[in-house]
Image: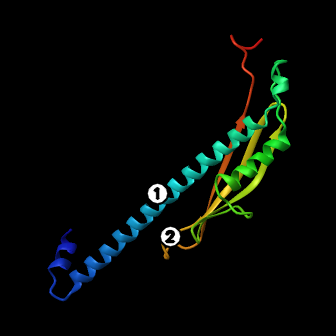
Amino acid sequence: MGKTGSILKSRKGDGLVFILILIFFIMTLAAIVIEYFRMDSLYQQVEYVLQRGVNSSVEYAMLDEYRKDGYARMDSVLAEEQFYGYLHENMQLDRDLNKYSGEQWVYTLEIQSLTATDDPPRLILKGQLKTRSVFSFLTGEVRLPFTLSSSNNRIDEGGSP
């Protein structure tokens, strides 16, 4: 602290330069923290909406004629079609799965795999959310991976048979 105090008391202008450097580092750190929380919020919002889409696709594609016999089955092709329809209609993604706010690009969904099984009824989505920083000095693309799944299992009252 002794050296810092002498720098601030200096009459040569060293104190002003020291304060400006300190302000620069504080502002840079604040920008990085703000950007981190912005991306985390975006990731959580997209993950929540995707989970709703996966859940609704599984529920929509359930084959009710099997339920009366005690089986849980799903039309996997219909579930996949329903999910892609959800991406375009509800999330307003274009054909390349890009999201725009007005004319400005926000993010791209990169789907690595979409796996649907009839029995047990399950839909598993793996992919990445690709976005960019809003600050010019934090350049480059950021890829945030996600894995979501939904299943519809029959639960008998009182436990397993």
Callout 2 secondary element: loop
Image disc number at residue 37:
1
* 34 with respect to 114 (left or right): left
Q: How is the image coloured?
A: rainbow
Instruction: Give the residue drawn at x 29%, y 79%.
Output: 20
Image disc number at residue 134:
2
How many marks are shown on the rendered structure? 2
The percent coordinates of residue 43 (x first, y second) are: 56, 54
* 10 with respect to 152 (left or right): left
Amino acid at dot 1: Phe
Instruction: Give the residue drawn at x 50%, y 70%.
Output: 134
Q: Earlier in the sequence, mark 2 or mark 1?
A: 1
The residue positioned farthest toward the bottom in the image shown: 12
Q: Quadrant of the N terminus?
A: bottom left
Q: Quadrant of the C terminus?
A: top right
**Vertical arrangement, residue 46 with respect to residue 68, above or below:** below
Q: Nearer the viewer, residue 154 or 100?
A: 100
Q: Nearer the viewer, residue 52 or 136?
A: 52
The percent coordinates of residue 154 (x first, y second) are: 75, 22
Mark 2 in CB contact with mark 1 (< 8 angstroms): no
Q: Tell me the quarter of the picture where residue 143 sits.
A: bottom right
Q: Tell me the quarter of the picture where residue 153 sits.
A: top right
The percent coordinates of residue 37 (x first, y second) are: 46, 57
* 145 with respect to 119 (left or right): left
**Vertical arrangement, residue 36 with respect to residue 73, above or below:** below
Query: Crowding near pointer 1: few (<14 within 10 Å), some, many (20+)?
Result: few
**Vertical arrangement, residue 51 with respect to residue 118, above or below:** below
